[in-house]
Amino acid sequence: MAAVLVVEDDFRIRSAIVERLTERGHVVDSVNRAMEGVERALSGDFDVVVLDLGLPDIAGGDALRMIRAVSAVPVLIATARDEESEMIRLLDLGADDYIVKPFSADQLEARLRAVLRRKDADSAAPILVVGGLSIDTRSREATLDGRPLDLTPKEYEVLVYLAEHEGQVVSKRELLAEVWHQPYGGADKTVDVHLSWLRRKLGESASEPRYLHTKRGVGVRIAPPT
């Protein structure tokens, strides 16, 4: 059972989601405007937020940005937009997952379970340490040799995934699937770009790695400097 906040302006859709999740034992509240949704999401009363994009006061993407700036509460985007570029943009903004309308109650329930499992996994291992790199998965903050790292949401998630698999070579396709929730076979360019940005913030380059070591044609692994 989870405490779920539904932010959706369509009364019919909102009522159906609330009814179906309540039937499955969840405690559900709902609002129809983005700003009220942001305020409620930041209250600490909810385990997960289901956020529509087409809201009447401000765009759902802007609401997501506001939430993610100060809170790690999981956010599941519910949208009628299925363009890959839009999905990647939202995940980069900090969405934990998304579901495309129309969807069934079973699909939504499965997505919520997956999001909450990831949240529980973060809580189980709150601090990840690799050499001078420290990642607090509860506050979603990372430091390098005591210096805070200014990471985008997706840079942070890539770093966490690699740190959770320290010493293992992780393929770009695996990162695309696990971090961006894109199916295997998708484009690797997004991963390349984020790895490049991460290297810059870690004070290294592909030719002179410190933490991120590329195995050509296989993937990348994280390891402390030697």
Image (spheres, rainbow, N blue to C red):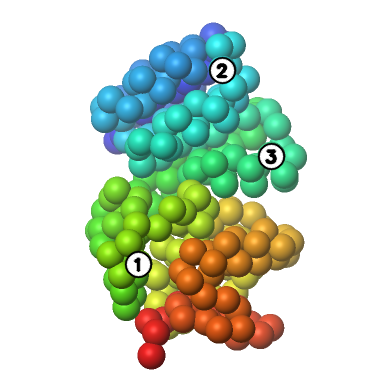
What count of labels does the image hold?
3
Q: Earlier in the sequence, mark 3 or mark 1?
A: 3
Label 3 crowd bin: few (<14), some (14–19), many (20+), radius 10 Å: few
Q: Are marks 3 and 1 in contact (CB under 8 Å)?
A: no
Q: Quadrant location of the C terminus?
A: bottom left
- Residue placed under numbered mark 2 in the picture: 58
Q: In terms of sequence position, does the residue under pointer 2 or pointer 3 come before the other?
A: 2
Disc 2 and disc 1 in contact, CB within 8 angstroms? no
Disc 1 residue crowd, few under 14, some 14–19, many 20+, Cα 10 Å: some
What is the spatial separation of the Cα atoms under label 2 and label 1, in whole angstroms? 36 Å
Residue identified by numbered label 1:
144
Residue highlighted by disc 3: 86
**Element under disc 2:** loop
Cα distance between the residues tagged 2 and 3: 17 Å
Does residue 42 lie above or below 187 as drawn? above
**Residue shown at the point (45%, 30%) measured from the top left:** 66
